[in-house]
Image: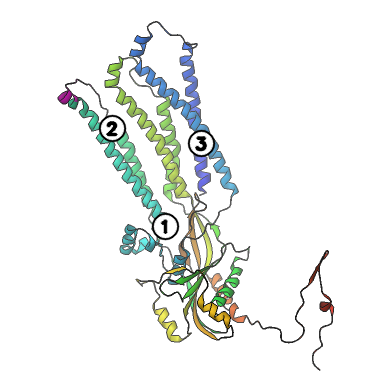
Amino acid sequence: MTNAEFLVGGVFLVSGVIVGWNGIERLQLLYHELSDYFPLKLPENLSQILLHSFPLIFKTFVNTVGSACAVIMGVLWTLSGLGEAFESRKKPPHAPDLEKPEVVAESLRSAQSLYWRSMSLPIRITAGVLPRARLISPITYEMFRRVLVSIGKMVLLGAFIALILYVLGMVPVLAHNHLQWEIRLAVPSGYPLYLVLALLIIANLLIAASLIPYRRREYARHCETMPVCGRGDPHVFFALLEEGCRLLSAQGPARNSPYRVERADNPVIKGTLIESNPKGMPSPARPAGYFCLPLIPLLLSAGFSRLTHFSPEVSSIYFTNFLSLHLLDYVLEVILALALILSGVYFGEWARKLLGVTRFQSAFVFCSLVAEKATGSAASAYSSRRGPGISRLPEWRAAEGLDEAFARWAKNPGTERDFLVEICWAEAVSESESATEEGPRYLTGMTKSEVLQDSMQRLIQLPFHVDLQPALCGDPPTAPTYSGSGLQESPKQREEPPSGDK
């Protein structure tokens, strides 16, 4: 089972129960320890007791606040995890809109992955050097970016901690040399924090390793170039083909409308991208996502346990000695506990990202105008510009406004037209992040399908079978009239049809 909401919700449900129960037990124990002081009884030597009880006060405060937070967060994680697990079972996978359909159109025409061309400069350089990097989906690129940013932040955080500890260690020396103050300050070692940061960096490296595509994705499609002659415009041919391709979504109405595009360098060349209804597929299982799941309850329970069971060795010491010798140790212990809790939440977010990628399967069809004259030379010239080894591919953009060529043809629709079209089709796989249902969906692979091939061989012939003629004989049909009981035929419709010439 690879449903991210269900898995992560179940893990946070277990984590919430563990953390909340630990907090409740610790609060009960603290109540029994402090019940002797209720109702409030102030001893006569209160000031002297307070001056020697700073370690006990600090310990009690951390235990109480940590236990209360454990109960609150445990209840919240339990309820949210329970709701998230049940909610994920009710909603079907939702296919968001395609990101950059014009790039998808050219990917289908050229049988190449082209999203990398519109991404950041480091990605373009990497993809230019390593062709396999071109097959990485934009969602995976974004995860790579987050991993690198997280590692960079952790390295900077480790350097900042080292700088803070170094400055604190130099405070007594600087105070003695410049202010002639005698200050004692015991600076603890930052080794526990460095260890946590090192573990986080190693985990991020494992996540990055799981994102590398070890299997080459296939980009293959069927393509056919055909001449079209007759009294019609390429827009009409596109519309007829779009209606015919609705048969590919026979299980229900097509949810995605066709996307009309035009060449950026030559707007005369038009095209239409058609997609059938996307169907949900099993999500890609990344091992790093399952690696993150057990770390969530482990780190969350460990972090809250250090807060609720915070018990330093020193129980009674004069406050000046406590501030100079033990305060930084106590603060470092609290920071370490908070770092473990934040690490658990961090791995929870990564588990959602790694396991929350939703995949869809659909049929893509791209029909584009090649030339205004359906000649063999135009077809061969256009075919020579195709191929996976080309370095420069045409760019498409959304076709907006009324096409002037179609407007001229509409004024004189009897004009003969002669043009060349290319139709490419493939079974395609696209993916999106389920955490953002309204987020983009990216094309990640294309394969040839014999079933789709048989269907398209019939569909691409449908526009050539259309032969509509106005009625030239007999009375024109009369529209039915509406009565209160429904549609009824008009008197002319009930008359006998003409028997014809004898």
Quadrant the C terminus occupies: bottom right
User: Disc 3 or 2, which lies upstream in sequence?
Assistant: 3
Mark 1: secondary structure: helix
Q: CA distance from mark 3 to mark 1?
A: 31 Å
Q: Residues within 10 Å of mark 2 (few under 14, many from 20)?
A: some
Label 1: how many residues lie within 10 Å, few (<14), some (14-19) or many (20+)? many
Its colouring scheme is rainbow
- Asked if 159 appears above or below 58 in the picture, the reply is below
Q: Which residue is mark 3?
A: 77
Say which quarter of the image contains residue 59: top left
Q: Can residue 205 be seen?
A: no
Residue 84: x and y in percent read: 54, 42
Which kind of residue does numbered mark 2 sit on?
A: Gly
Residue behind mark 2: 190
The kind of residue tagged 1 is Pro
Say if 257 sits above or below 229 in the image: above
Specify the farthest residue to the bottom: 502
Magenta stretch bounds: 175-192
Please state which amino acid type lies under the numbered disc 3.
Trp
Is residue 294 visible from the viewing direction of this image? yes
| Marker disc for residue 500 | none
* Residue 412 point in image, percent of width and height: 58, 83
Instruction: Give the residue at mark 1.
Output: 138
Figure check: 188 above or below 228: above
